[in-house]
């Protein structure tokens, strides 16, 4: 029976052990010691059957595992993905540097815009002042032009009066 333990499938071995147990329990029927032994042996056989079932599940799963080619392909894929991740990390660093440079440029341009706006305000004030001065100068020129015309008219009259007196 010891040799059969290693050679037979567990279900066949358990079946033979159960038959042997029934045969032995038949010899010692009526003894309480035999009943306890029978109960213990049955529980032990159930545990062996459960272990055999678990082993068969594990064997089936092992048969489904990929072969060395699949493992090598998976390792190659992992290596490729690591290289791609390293490339993406360097791209991220470059993008972060570009973003930092652009932020610095934006800050500089904002300062320039603020300076230009201040200059624009100053120029607007200067333009208003200049327009006001030009308007006043035009008014003064018109007044002076009118006075000039009046003076010329007066000079003509004076010239005519002088010409009539000398005649």
Image (cartoon, rainbow, N blue to C red):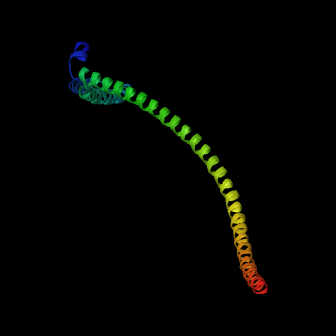
In the depicted structure, whether residue 25 falls above or below residue 155: above
Farthest residue to the front: give it.
Answer: 167
Find residue 122 and report its horizontal and vertical position in percent.
70, 57
Q: Quadrant of the C terminus?
A: bottom right
Q: Quadrant of the N terminus?
A: top left
Find residue 148 and report its horizontal and vertical position in percent.
73, 76
Find residue 101 and report its horizontal and vertical position in percent.
55, 37
**In terms of image quadrants, where is residue 146?**
bottom right
Q: Nearer the viewer, residue 21 or 128?
A: 128
Q: Nearer the viewer, residue 57 or 81?
A: 81
Q: Is residue 93 left or right of residue 139?
A: left
Q: Nearer the viewer, residue 99 or 142?
A: 142
User: Residue at point 48% right, 36% down?
Assistant: 95
In the depicted structure, whether residue 19 falls above or below residue 113: above
Q: Can residue 34 be seen in the rendering of this structure?
A: no
**In terms of image quadrants, where is residue 6?**
top left
How many numbered discs, if any? 0
In the depicted structure, whether residue 75 falls above or below residue 103: above
Q: Can residue 62 be seen in the rendering of this structure?
A: yes
Find residue 68 and report its horizontal and vertical position in percent.
25, 20
User: Residue at point 74% right, 73% down?
Assistant: 140
């Amino acid at each position: 029976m010891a040799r059969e333990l290693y050679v037979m499938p567990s279900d066949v071995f358990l079946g033979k052990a159960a038959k042997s147990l029934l045969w032995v329990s038949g010899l010692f029927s009526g003894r309480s010691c035999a009943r306890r032994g029978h109960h213990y042996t049955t529980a032990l056989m159930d545990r062996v059957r459960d272990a055999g079932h678990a082993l068969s599940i594990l064997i089936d799963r092992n048969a489904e595992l990929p072969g060395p080619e699949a493992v090598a392909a998976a390792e190659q894929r992992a290596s490729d993905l690591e290289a791609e991740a390293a490339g993406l990390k360097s791209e991220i660093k470059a993008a972060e540097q570009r973003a930092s440079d652009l932020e610095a440029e934006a800050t500089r341009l904002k300062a320039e815009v603020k300076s230009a706006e201040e200059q624009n305000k100053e120029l607007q004030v200067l333009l208003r002042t200049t327009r006001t001065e030009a308007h006043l100068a035009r008014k003064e020129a018109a007044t002076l032009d009118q006075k000039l015309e009046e003076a010329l008219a007066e000079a003509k009259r004076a010239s005519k009066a002088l010409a009539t007196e000398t005649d």
